[in-house]
Image (cartoon, helix red, strand yellow):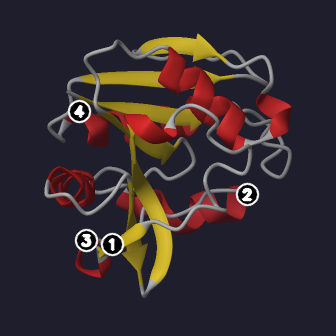
Amino acid sequence: MIAAVVLAAGEASRFGRPKQELLLPHVLGRLARARLDDVVVVLGAHHVEVRARVVTCTEWERGPGASARAGFAALGPQVEAAVVCLADGPLIAPAAIERVVAAWRGGAGDLVAASYGGVRGHPVVVGRRLWTGFPDDGGRSLAPVLVPCDDLGAPEDVDTEADLRRIEGLLGE
């Protein structure tokens, strides 16, 4: 089984309000189009209503790795790997999810990440072997196998209202 862990625990200080309310429906809609067995949303700084199973990370201030660990802990023993994605990446392509999962299933490694223009991005597949002791930096200190997803479009990174305005027209796709 493959599950998704959506990291949505941050404070959204640059955005000025809980951006999770605006962006999670888009991320969850795109995840629903990928072939995943379960989805867990990890909240922390803000409680927002979402149509998904939610876990709360009380240590969200430690970094994205703390949120990922909270998500991993919520997954059942039958889950072999987790697709980690960000709540503020609303344009994540279902095909990118399927591509990195296929690479992981094909034996690429325990950590497989989408890349855009040669730069590591999301989604990231994390095999169960790496869940224990997953670093607070969200795995940035770990070297993934990169899977090019340039042709699918980057998930974007919405940190400010200006970022949201820039991609608003693409959110309905």
The quadrant of the rendering that contains the C terminus is bottom left
Front-most of 132 and 95?
Answer: 132
> In the rendered image, which residue does mark 1 sit on?
153
The residues bearing labels 2 and 3 have C-alpha atoms spaced at a distance of: 23 Å
Is label 3 in contact with label 4 (beta carbons under 8 Å)? Answer: no
Residue that carries the numbered disc 2 in the rendered image? 160
Task: Tell us which disc is closer to us: 4 or 2.
Answer: 4
Residue pictured at 70% horizontal, 32% vertical: 66
- Residue 17's spot in the image, x, y percent? 79, 36
- Of the residues shown, which amino acid type is indicated by label 4? Ala
Q: In percent of the image, x 30 and y 78: which residue is there?
A: 148
Which residue is at a point 29% across and 74% down the rendered structure image? 149
Q: Nearer the viewer, residue 74 or 171?
A: 74
Instruction: Report helix, strand or loop for mark 2.
Output: loop
Instruction: Return the residue at label 4.
Output: 32
Tag 1's secondary structure?
Answer: loop
- Cα–Cα gap, marks 2 and 1: 20 Å
Mark 1 to mark 4 CA distance (whole Å): 18 Å
In percent of width and height, residue 144 lies at 45, 65
Q: Are marks 4 and 2 in contact (CB under 8 Å)?
A: no
- Residue assigned mark 3: 152
Q: Is residue 8 visible?
A: no
Other residues around mark 3 within 10 Å, as few (<14) / some (14–19) / many (≥20): some
